[in-house]
Image (spheres, grey):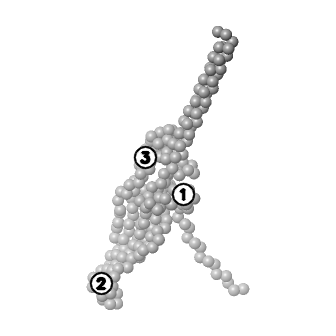
């Protein structure tokens, strides 16, 4: 083989080697990107299932006097709590620890804006493809229903009623999954900046004593 032919062959081998190296680099980058997308994208499966509503009548009064007659009037006080099953499956390619957070909302029984009234969390360590289901229960809420039977009467509600839930799964500070029966609540708490937890009651303003 002459020098010209030998040089051409060497050049071709060097080009093929360089192309092979570039291809391997590309494959490694794609593999790492795919792993990251799986780990920090939708790495878990989350499902929330309402199980039951537990309700109990605490007090019942018939024919209460309203000043305009009492026949058929009543006042009933009842407690209610909601039970849910939460299922989490680890879909990442390795074992990981997750934080499951849930928050319950309540609204005035007579109508009004829903606000958080209870928040809790649970740590889960799941192997690859590991799954765990556990039960959560909302604290009891009390509602008093008063019915007036006289002409021009009606029904009045007092207390707070259950108004929804949000459940989410986090890995560190990253939110991986959010579930709620309310689409607006789900969208709101997909945002990491959304305030999570029950607001502390405002302290009454202090009245300054006259000097």
Nearer the observer, 169 or 64: 169
Per the model, the C-alpha gap separating discs 2 and 1 is 48 Å
Q: Residue furthest top?
A: 1
What residue is shown with label 2? 149
Q: Secondary structure at mark 1?
A: loop
Q: Residues within 10 Å of mark 2 (few under 14, many from 20)?
A: some
Nearer the observer, 21 or 139: 21
Quarter placement of the N terminus: top right
Q: Which mark is residue 191?
A: 1
**Among numbered discs 2 and 3, the one appearing first in the sequence:** 3
Nearer the observer, 101 or 62: 101
Q: Is residue 62 left or right of residue 195?
A: left
Quarter placement of the C terminus: bottom right
Judge whether 123 appears above or below 155 on screen: above
**Among numbered discs 3 and 1, the one appearing first in the sequence:** 3
Q: Nearer the viewer, mark 2 or mark 1?
A: 1
What residue is shown with label 3? 132
- At 36% from the left edge and 74% from the top edge, which residue is drawn? 77
């Amino acid at each position: 083989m002459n020098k010209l032919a030998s040089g051409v062959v060497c050049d071709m081998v060097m080009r093929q080697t360089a192309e092979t190296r570039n291809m391997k680099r590309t494959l490694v980058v794609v593999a790492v990107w795919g792993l990251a997308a799986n780990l920090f994208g939708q790495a878990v499966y989350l499902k929330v299932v309402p199980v039951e509503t537990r309700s109990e009548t605490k007090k019942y009064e018939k024919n209460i006097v309203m000043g305009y007659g009492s026949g058929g009037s009543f006042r009933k006080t009842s407690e209610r709590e909601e039970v849910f099953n939460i299922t989490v499956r680890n879909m990442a390619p390795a074992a990981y620890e997750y934080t499951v957070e849930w928050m319950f909302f309540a609204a005035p029984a007579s109508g009004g804006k829903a606000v958080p009234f209870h928040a809790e969390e649970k740590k889960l360590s799941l192997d690859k493809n590991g799954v765990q289901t556990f039960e959560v229960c909302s604290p009891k809420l009390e509602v008093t229903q008063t019915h007036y039977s006289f002409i021009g009467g009606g029904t009045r509600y007092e207390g707070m009623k259950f108004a929804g839930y949000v459940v989410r799964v986090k890995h560190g500070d990253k939110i991986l999954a959010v579930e709620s029966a309310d689409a607006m609540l789900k969208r709101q708490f997909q945002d990491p900046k959304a305030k999570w937890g029950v607001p502390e009651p405002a302290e009454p303003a202090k009245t300054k004593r006259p000097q």
